[in-house]
Structures are given as structure tokens and as C-alpha cells.
Amino acid sequence: MKLGVFGLNSKVSVSPDVVRPLVEHCEALGYESWWAGEHVVLPSPRVALAPMDPEDAILDPLIHLTYVAAVSSTLLLGTGIIILPQRNPLVLAKQVASLDVLSGGRVMLGIGAGYLEPELHAIGVTLAERGSRTDDHLGAMRAIWYDPAPVTFTGMHTDFAGIDAHPRPARSIPLVIGGHSPSAYRRAVEQGHGWYGFHRSPEQAAESIGGIRAAIEEHGRPGDLGPIEISITPSRPLTADTVRAYRDAGVHRLIVNPLPVEDPTAIAAFLTEQATAVDLAR
């Protein structure tokens, strides 16, 4: 079972004085990956679906992960997730490729379609078009990363021809698709190297994996993508028994979330406990 950590680009851990020792602690414990989510803006006052208060600090994931890359040597750098329809695909492709080159090929790009309507609306994206924009932007990014020059792409929302962009990524960027809907499962099957479920119990993880298998049966899967790697942020702290339950369900990576703990010492202790639970389950 691979072990990652989520969410330490927000709240108390926006400070480099907090992040650097936690990065060093995770590497010493054998954590495989460090994941950062995003909300460009938050509704004020808070609405029911919002995961954070509007006053809560959250750093841009790619800027945060660039700092993590500079103070680490082994951690994979995951976005969990970037809300893709809110981003310009060519600008994002340049940022991700730059980080992958600077980090020595450690980026894992997790994306999702988004769900928080006030945030999407503020950035100029409707709920109705978030899915089509997500598929469109994935295609545009893969074209500018991997197609021979001059690069051409024609999509529903993105259209370009006769361009190129360097540096290309250090290697093929693993794409991880987030979300619990049939559209997310279909997108993971057709375009993703992995799938990411947030706050899922072992039983919910097994249900989602069933949905992914059904999507493979319905849509097929390109052979060059290989097996789908399943990542889950658990809905509660891990024990050896729950680690085994996730493993039995078909999960490959657990990405633990220390927040809302606000004490860096308590966060470090939590990370130690979670690494111990995974070790005990082996």
C-alpha cells in the first residue's frame, strides 16, 4: 500500500516554517507522495457544499508543490485535485511541465470537474459546461505535451494550430481523475492513469471501484494507459484493520488528511500514527 498526505497547502500549514519540517518528516517515514488541493475562491458567507470557511487560507497547489519539490528529494507531487475547467489548458500545461522538469519527473496531475457553483461562476464557468471543458482541456494539454510540432488541436472550447511549447514534461505525466460520478469513472477509464476518491470508506471505495469496472465494460480502456491505480483519502484515521480493508477493496494508495488539526506537532504525530498503521498492515 502506497501512502500519501493531503491538504498541507492550507490553514496552519501555509507557512514554509511549518511545511519544511513536515516534508522532512514524511520523507523520513517513507511517505510516497504529497498532494495539494485547490479552491481559487470560496463563497462568502460559507454555503453548505463549501469544504472550507472563506477566511481559511489555501495556497495555489502548483506554487505550493514547487516549494515542496525544492525541499524534498523523493516525494511525488500530486494535485488532489486541480479544478480543470477553471484553468486555461495551455497555461496549466506549461506550469505542470515546468514543475515536472524542475522536480526531476515527480508530478502526478490530479484533476476534477468541480462542484462548487459560486467558485465556478466567479471564474466564468457554468456547471452545465464543466464536464465538456474538462474533457476538452485534457485533450489540449496532452496535445501540447506529446504531439509532434507544429501542434494542432480542435475541441469544443479550445482551438489552436501551428504552435509548440517547451520544455516538454520530463516524462509522461500520470493523470489522476477525481470524482464519484459516472462521468468521472468514464473519464478515468478513457483518459486517466489513476482515479482518486475523497473521504471514502472501504465500502464506498469498493462501490466506486465497481463503478470503474462497469465503465471499462461500457467504454473500453486504451491499452497504453495500463491498469487504473486507485487512490483514496480515507474518511477517518487509519488502523491496521482499515488499511487491510482498503487493500482488499482494491485500493493501491491511501492519501491521509491531517486537517483540521491546527498544531504542527499534532500533525506530525498524526502522520507517524498513519505510517505505523500501514506498516502494521503489511
Image (tube, rainbow, N blue to C red):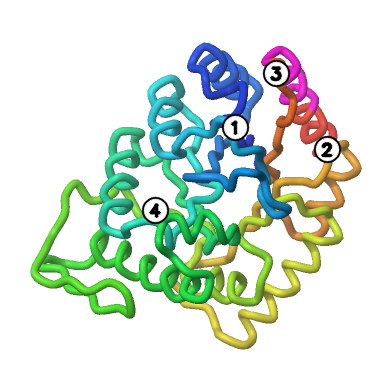
- Which residue is under mark 1? 55
Question: In this orientation, which residue lies closer to the viewer: 148 or 151?
Answer: 151
Circle 4 SS class: loop
- Give left or right: position of 160 versus 279: left
The total number of labels drawn is 4
Q: Which label's residue is closer to the chain start, 4 or 3?
A: 4
127 in the magenta segment: no
How far across and how far down the image is residue 73, in percent?
Answer: 44, 25
Disc 3 marks which amino acid?
Ala
In this view, the mark in front (3 or 1): 1
Secondary element at tag 2: loop
Distance from label 1 to label 2 (Cα)? 29 Å
Amino acid on which disc 1 is placed: Glu
Tell me the kind of residue under disc 2: Leu
CB under 8 Å between discs 1 and 2 = no
The residue under label 3 is: 268
Q: For the magenta stretch, what is the residue range?
A: 264-273
Tell me the distance, in whole angstroms, between the alpha carbons under discs 3 and 1. Answer: 24 Å
Q: Secondary structure of the magenta portion, mostly?
A: helix
106 sits left or right of 258 in the view: left
Q: Which disc is residue 173 wearing? A: 4
